[in-house]
Amino acid sequence: MGLLDKIKQLASERSVTIAEIERATGISNGQIRRWDASSPKAENLAKVADYFGVSTDYLLGRDSKNGTSSQAELIAAHIDSGVSDEEMTQIINFIEFTKKNNKK
């Protein structure tokens, strides 16, 4: 899976558009879609990785672990085992939302 496909997948999972990612990260309009044919600047790649809470290696396909499962493992280790899958998903989504909004 290429870089743009990976970003589209993450965007879809979080119900955001590429344009919303560009606005939130300060990347110029339409720039991310061009990454299918050209390489991004390292700083822009890092901004997108930070936005999603993943590593740049994950975006580039060098690392298969995106960080979400490790967040879930950390949370699960500190919370009573009675937490449902839906509640765990809500906790993780809240953490990602908070990280995203603290960068603004």
Image (cartoon, grey):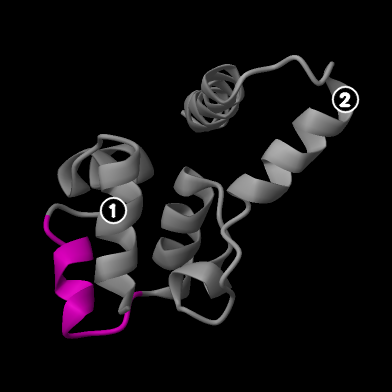
Relative to 90, residue 28 above or below: below
Q: Nearer the viewer, residue 8 or 27?
A: 8
Q: Nearer the viewer, residue 78 or 4?
A: 78
> Which dot, 1 or 2, sits closer to the camera?
2
Residue 95 belongs to magenta span: no
Which residue type does callout 1 highlight? Ile
Spot the residue most to the left.
30
Q: Can residue 95 be seen at all in this image of the molecule?
A: yes
The residue drawn where x is 77% and y is 30% is 75
The image position of residue 18, as x and y in percent, is 20, 49
> Looking at the image, which residue is at 49% across and 32% down?
100
Number of numbered tags placed on the structure image: 2
Question: Nearer the N terminus, badge 1 or badge 2?
Answer: 1
Residue 2 location (% of width, % of height): 30, 79
| Left or right: 56 as drawn, with respect to 67 | left
> Alpha-carbon neighbours of circle 1 within 10 Å: few (<14), some, or many (≥20)?
some
Q: Is residue 15 left or right of residue 95?
A: left
Q: Amino acid at mark 2?
A: His
Q: From the viewer's perspective, is residue 29 above or below residue 55?
A: above
Stretch in magenta: 30-40
Q: In the picture provided, is 77 more to the left or to the right than 24?
A: right
Can residue 26 be seen here? no
- Which residue is nearer to you in this view: 103 or 2? 2
42, 69: nearer the viewer: 69
Q: Position of residue 6 (x, y in %)?
A: 34, 65
Residue 24 figure quarter? top left
Residue pictured at 38% horizontal, 74% vertical = 41
**Dot 2 crowding, Cα within 10 Å, few <14, some 14–19, many 20+:** few
Residue 78 bears which disc, if any? Answer: 2
Q: Which mark is residue 27?
A: 1
Q: Quadrant of the N terminus?
A: bottom left
